[in-house]
Image: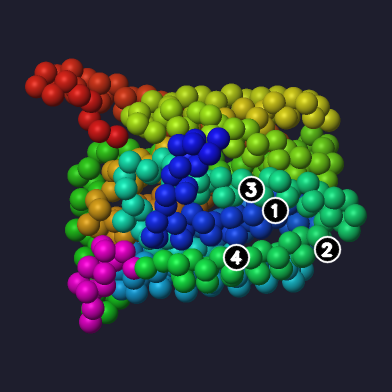
């Protein structure tokens, strides 16, 4: 086990990759402890399904602004400083608001502040990958996901607390815990990290320039994106997957408790099962995929996700074993789809303009993604299963796009006998 490729990679991590990966559980554990109950927490204060979806949509609309300027902020302040400042604003502060929430207004205010995480998403990604060995990207992103999955071993405790103290007091306590652990994570990551080489270059290039002067250069970066079919393909996959995860994160617990009539205190058991299956997949399967064209296993990942959503909407009320099978199937699809998509993003984005390219790409994604929180909420009010029917459609489109990309790359290789190779991922 100690000679497993993942373990070897973890032990040999250095620099910013080490800082980002080693501190990630301090964010992932509290987030995954409270995440299964967020929608139920809002329901407990009288919010309707539409209002819950509206809170999600408001957060996404606000995040458009922050995504637009995230690249310029990251270049001006540097990857390291931006990550510290905006992590504290976007996670530490909302956790305290959620902990004292009483009505719709609290959740809207917290969602608006939490939307600032789009800035740190950009800067943290740059901090993680810019000085990293590209050959280790699958392993690195796998460990980032594994850091969050460690919460699975604590999730039954959350269920016991809900059963003992009820939902609202437990969630208030979990949010206070999240504030403490996440803030510690942000401070430790900042202490262990150094500014990246590309970050130093961009800080020097933008020194003395006002923030909006840096933004004025964005149209040139947008033209680069529009001229790159590979980047556009990656952006389309990001959009489809982000919508699906938003729908899943917002409405899964509502479907399970309200329609399938599964007790709320049982939800952590499904989080535990999902995480265990994902951990097994990461350690047993992912090392075999590290040198493959990432698009091929992504197709299989999307097929597994489609099957899991079909099974989810077919589960009869109170049938916990079948729900467990659907959860395990989803857990097999997530690593193959999401982790390899993260690698694809790194490989297809212009390294010299990574911050601004990611900012523009995610701005487009968020603008197109924003209405789906409200749309999914309205669908859920008609039938709790309909948001997941939407997921089936979107995962199917993602799988088809990925399959067509493989066919296109194979055709290009066949028409170029001088190389005999497909286009790189």
Residue, x 28% and y 43% (percent of image)?
Answer: 348
CA neighbours of label 4 inside 10 A, class few (<14), some (14 to 19), many (20+): many
Residue ID for mark 4? 182
| Dominant secondary structure, magenta | helix
The numbered disc on residue 169 is 2
Q: Is residue 309 above or below residue 231?
A: above
Q: Could you tell me which secondary element the residue under label 3 belongs to?
A: helix
Q: CA separation, marks 1 and 2?
A: 14 Å
In front here: 91 or 400? 91
Label 1–label 3 contact, CB within 8 A: no
Q: Earlier in the sequence, mark 1 or mark 3?
A: 1
Q: CA separation, marks 1 and 3?
A: 10 Å
- Assess whether residue 40 is covered by the magenta stretch: no
- Assess whether residue 204 is covered by the magenta stretch: yes
Q: Could you tell me which secondary element the residue under label 1 belongs to?
A: helix
Label 1–label 2 contact, CB within 8 A: no
Residue, x 26% and y 62% (percent of image)?
Answer: 198
Q: Which residues are magenta?
A: 195-208
Q: How is the image coloured?
A: rainbow
Residue, x 20% and y 72% (percent of image)?
Answer: 205
Q: Position of residue 213 (x, y in %)?
A: 24, 74
Label 3–label 4 contact, CB within 8 A: no
Residue ID for mark 1? 33
In front here: 277 or 92? 277
The numbered disc on residue 150 is 3
Q: Position of residue 338 (x, y in %)?
A: 48, 39
Q: Earlier in the sequence, mark 1 or mark 2?
A: 1
């Amino acid at each position: 086990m100690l000679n497993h490729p993942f373990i070897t990679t973890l032990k040999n991590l250095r620099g910013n990759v080490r800082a980002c990966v080693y501190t990630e559980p301090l964010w992932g554990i509290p987030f995954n402890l409270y995440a299964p109950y967020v929608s139920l927490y809002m329901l407990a204060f009288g919010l309707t399904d539409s209002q819950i979806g509206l809170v999600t949509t408001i957060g996404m609309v606000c995040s458009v602004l922050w995504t637009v300027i995230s690249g310029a902020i990251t270049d001006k302040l540097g990857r390291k400083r931006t990550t510290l400042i905006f992590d504290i604003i976007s996670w530490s502060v909302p956790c305290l608001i959620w902990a004292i929430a009483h009505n719709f207004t609290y959740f809207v205010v917290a969602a608006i502040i939490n939307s600032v995480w789009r800035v740190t998403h950009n800067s943290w990604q740059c901090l993680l990958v810019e000085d990293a060995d590209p050959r280790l990207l699958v392993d690195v992103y796998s460990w980032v996901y594994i850091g969050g999955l460690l919460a699975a071993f604590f999730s039954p405790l959350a269920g016991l607390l809900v059963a003992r103290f009820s939902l609202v007091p437990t969630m208030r306590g979990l949010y206070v815990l999240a504030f403490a652990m996440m803030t510690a994570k942000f401070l430790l990551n900042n202490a262990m990290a150094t500014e990246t080489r590309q970050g130093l270059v961009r800080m020097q290039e933008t020194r003395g320039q006002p923030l909006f002067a840096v933004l004025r250069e964005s149209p040139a970066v947008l033209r680069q994106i529009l001229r790159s079919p590979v980047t556009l393909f990656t952006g389309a996959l990001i959009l489809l997957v982000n919508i699906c995860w938003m729908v899943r994160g917002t409405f899964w617990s509502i479907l399970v408790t309200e329609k399938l009539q599964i007790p709320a205190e049982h939800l952590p058991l499904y989080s535990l099962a999902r995480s265990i299956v994902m951990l097994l997949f990461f350690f047993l399967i992912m090392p075999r995929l590290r040198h493959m064209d990432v698009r091929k296993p992504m197709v299989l990942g999307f097929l597994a996700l489609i099957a899991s959503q079909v099974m989810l909407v077919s589960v009869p009320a109170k049938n916990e074993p079948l729900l467990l099978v659907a959860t395990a199937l989803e857990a097999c699809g997530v690593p193959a789809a999401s982790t390899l998509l993260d690698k694809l993003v790194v490989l297809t984005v212009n390294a010299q303009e990574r911050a601004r390219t990611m900012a523009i790409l995610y701005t487009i994604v968020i603008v197109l993604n924003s209405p789906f929180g409200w749309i999914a909420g309205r669908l859920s009010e008609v039938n709790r299963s309909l948001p997941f029917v939407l997921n089936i459609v979107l995962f199917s489109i993602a799988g088809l796009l990925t399959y067509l990309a493989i066919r296109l790359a194979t055709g290009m290789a066949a028409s170029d006998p001088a190389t005999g190779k497909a286009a790189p991922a």
